[in-house]
Each structure stands twice: as structure tokens, then as C-alpha cells.
Image (cartoon, helix red, strand yellow):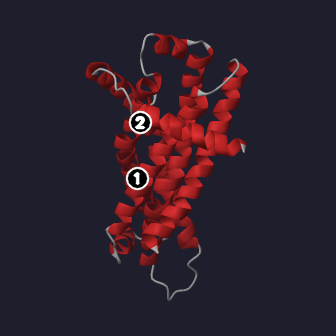
Amino acid sequence: MNYLEHIGKYFIMLGRVFKKPQRSKVFYEALLREIEDLGLKSLGIIMFISFFIGGVIALQTALNLESPFIPKSLIGFAAKRSIILEFAPTFCSIILAGKVGSYITSSIGSMRVTEQIDALEVMGINSLNYLVLPKILATIFFYPFLISLGMFLGILGGWVSGVLSGLFSGTEYIVGLQTDFNPFLLTYAMIKTLFFAFLIATVPSYHGYYVKGGSIAVGRASTQSVVWTTILIVIANYFLTQLLLT
């Protein structure tokens, strides 16, 4: 029953988020601030992890191809599919859920326990629209770029690992990238990214907005928000894969 209560409160929160918008100038400034905090400050970790994970995927694929009858171009093909289908949209989103989700929950939760949100409501400001909607738009508009960059760097990391290790040539890797390329896979990855971005913005916001207690409660809410955001991303990943690829 407790889960049903949280689900209801979550959807009620979403309804209030899109009501009574703020002045365009105030909203625009808040949106730019959220793009910097939630997007630009995550560039470094996504670039670093994507490049090296792409290299690891390529190396592991190459080391497991023991048969001389299997072409080396299969390494590029497998790396391309792994990075585009799962690593970039799903695992990068889980990483962002940990980094960004805890920040969102702690920032909104701190405002709740220090009664800043109550002050906004007293002034007649729709606090959910003011606090949450810029976060939703910032993640939805910026994360597709972030995930696309992760795809590119992951594939580049695979190419660099092959050239430096000598396990396969760069030409063979590129041939594998071009083999049986399906543009819909990129569309599929972007659709997943938009869903995951929405969850990353709203689930931590819910935990922060409805937190009760002091600073310890905010810390617990941050942990819960990361856990639940990750769980929902994994569940959404399963159903989106079923709907879009089968």
C-alpha cells in the first residue's frame, strides 16, 4: 500500500510541475543554470568512462575470438552494437542517476528542511514548476547530446585500443563498424535516453521535495532516490527493448 501511495504522489507531483509556469525570464535563467549543473558538469565523467569502456569492450571481444575463421571485423561490429544499444544509453544513464540524482535530491531536500520551499509557496510561486520543470527540460534536451558523445568516444576508444595493442587493425575495426549498420538503432538509443532523462530528473526531485526531517533524512532520501532511479531505468530499459526491437 505504501508503494501505491508513493506512485500516486509522484503522478500528482508531475501534474503540478506543468501548471502555473513562472515568468519567462526567471524560467530561462533557471533552465540555463540546470543545464550547467546537470549537463555540462557531467561531461567529464561521461567522456572518461565512455572512452575506456569502449576500449575494454573491444579488447575483450578480440581476446575471445580464438578461431582463425572468424573475421577480425566482428570486433568492430560487436563493439558498435554493444555501445549503441546498451552501454551509452543505459549504463551512462545509470552513472548519471548516481551523480545527478543525488545532487537533485540533496539540493531540493535541503530547501525543504530549511523551509525555503514553504517560503516560495507563501509568495504564491508554484515551487514544483520553479524547481523541477527546468531540471526536466535540461536533462531531456542535453542528455541526448551527452549520450551521443558517449557513443562516439566509446567507439573511438575501441579503435584506439586495437591500434595500440596490435590485436586488430584500425581498418578491420572500421569495416566492422560499417557492416550491417541499422540507423534505427540510433533512434532506439535516443528514445531510451529521453525516457531515462525524464526519470533522472523527476524521481530524485520527488524524493527531495517530500523529504521529512533534518539533514540525516536528506542523506537517506538521496540514497533512496539513486536506488529507485536505477531500478526504474532498468525496468524501463526492458520494456522499451521489448516494444522497439521485437
Residue ID at (57%, 67%)? 60
Q: How many marks?
A: 2
Q: Residue at x 64, y 32 (%)?
A: 222
* Location of residue 165 in the rendering, given as x and y in whole percent from the top left corner: 50, 63
Give the mark nearest the N terminus, 2 or 1: 2
Q: What quarter of the picture does the N terminus occupy?
A: top right
The residue most toward the left is 24
Q: Residue 166: which numbered mark, if any?
A: none
Q: Please state which amino acid type lies under the numbered disc 2.
A: Gly
Q: Is residue 134 above or below residue 79?
A: above
| Amino acid carrying mark 1 in the image | Leu
Q: Position of residue 18 (x, y in %)?
A: 39, 34
Q: Would you name the residue on which mark 1 appears? A: 153
Q: Which residue is nearer to you in this view: 20 or 154?
A: 20
The residue at the point 58 percent across, 81 percent down is 66
Q: CA distance from mark 2 to mark 1?
A: 17 Å
In the image, 233: left or right of 30? right
> Looking at the image, which residue is at 39% across and 56% down?
191
Q: Which residue is mark 2?
A: 39
The answer to which quarter of the image holds residue 72 is bottom left
